[in-house]
Image (spheres, rainbow, N blue to C red):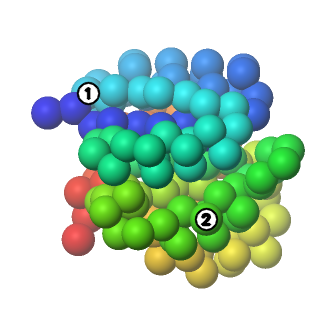
């Protein structure tokens, strides 16, 4: 059974490299990428049966940053959030960003860009963690 991943990142190259790491890591990931957090929220709200297992979320994006997305995502009704977990995937090494991310119940991890194949393969364990 595949794991459905939604990547949210405003950088086309980061979306491409992350997709490649996910596709080459040996786990059956079905990957979709969007460049705007608002687009991701719209998708989640218009289709409560979206089936997204994992969101890989960048922090620094225009209009709505990753933390704005987290606030909006956590405010969604439970049926729209589903069982989706979030992993921050950022170039930020700021401990304040890590602490802020950890303060959100839906966030299960914080990884640094670029995502490598080993980290990509291990994401499945975060999705299926209790």
- Residue 58 screen position, x and y as percent: 68, 47
Left or right, residue 32 beside residue 34: left
Q: Give the farthest residue toward the right.
A: 62
Q: Residue at x 42, y 27 (%)?
A: 31
> Dividing the picture into quarters, in which one does residue 11 lie?
top right
Q: Residue 29: horizontal and vertical position, in percent?
A: 32, 29
Secondary structure, mark 2, is helix
Residue 48 seen in the figure: yes
Circle 2 Cα neighbour tier, 10 Å, few/some/many (<14 / 14–19 / ≥20): some
User: Is residue 18 shown left or right of residue 124?
Assistant: right
Look at the numbered disc 1 and give the secondary structure of its residue: loop
17 and 33: which is toward the camera = 33
In the image, residue 69 lies at what x, y percent? 65, 58
Q: Of discs 1 and 2, which sits in the foreground?
A: 2
Residue 28 marker: 1
Residue 119 in sight in this render: no
Of 11 and 119, the residue lying toward us: 11
Q: Residue at x 31, y 63 (%)?
A: 79
Q: Residue at 75% x, 68% y: name it.
A: 97
Q: Is residue 112 left or right of residue 56?
A: right
Local packing at callout 1 (Cα closer than 10 Å; few below 14, some 14-19, many 20+) is some
Numbered circle sitting on residue 72: 2
Q: How many marks?
A: 2
Percent of width and height locating residue 112: 66, 48
């Amino acid at each position: 059974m595949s794991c459905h991943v939604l990547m949210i990142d405003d950088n086309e190259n980061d979306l491409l490299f992350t997709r490649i790491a996910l596709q080459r890591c040996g786990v059956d990931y079905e990957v979709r990428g969007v460049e705007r957090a608002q687009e991701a929220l719209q998708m989640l709200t218009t289709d409560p049966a979206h089936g997204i297992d994992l969101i890989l979320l960048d922090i620094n994006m225009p209009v709505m940053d990753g933390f704005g997305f987290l606030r909006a995502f956590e405010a969604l009704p439970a049926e729209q959030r589903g069982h989706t977990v979030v992993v921050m995937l950022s170039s930020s090494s700021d401990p304040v960003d890590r602490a802020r991310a950890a303060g959100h119940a839906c966030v299960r991890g914080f990884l640094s860009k670029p995502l490598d194949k080993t980290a990509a393969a291990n994401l499945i364990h975060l999705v299926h963690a209790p």
